[in-house]
Amino acid sequence: MKPLHVDRIDFSDHHIFQTADIDMIRTRLQKLQAEFASKPIVVVTEKDYDREPEVLKHLNPYEILVLCSHLQILPHKGCTEDSFKEVLRLPFEVKLSSIK
């Protein structure tokens, strides 16, 4: 099914939702429902859902979908997942050796 309309509300990373945020989201959902004569579906990232799943219950009766993702390293021009991990590991080794 293709969406009738896509709307978004952006919050800063690690945003702690307040009652005013939930009220604003609910108001926006009600306006969208009235405008399109269809109940909106809320999509949140897995990270935000895991951090505050109880807060999202306040958006009832709207359906909440959680967008899940994972990182996959694909080989490209001689770089592999192992070489990527090596690049990530080096700064930690340098930092740990300077602490000793």
Image: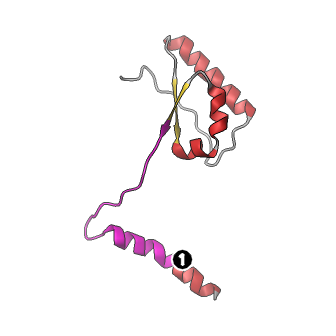
Foreground: 45 or 9? 45
Q: Is residue 74 above or below residue 82?
A: above
**Mark 1 burial class by Cα count in 10 Å: few <14, some 14-19, many 20+:** few
Q: What are the residue bounds of the magenta stretch?
A: 66-91
Tell me the amino acid under the disc marked 1. Phe
Name the image quarter holding residue 5: top left
Q: Is residue 19 above or below residue 81?
A: above
Side of 75 where 62 appears, left or right: right
- On the image, the x and y values in percent for residue 74 come to 30, 60
- Looking at this view, name the residue that lies furthest to the bottom: 100
Q: Residue at x 62, y 24 (%)?
A: 60
Foreground: 4 or 89? 89
Side of 51 where 69 appears, left or right: left
Residue 16 in magenta?
A: no
Q: Is residue 34 above or below residue 94?
A: above
Residue labelled with disc 1:
92
Identify the image quadrant of the N terminus. top left
- On the image, the x and y values in percent for residue 22 come to 68, 30
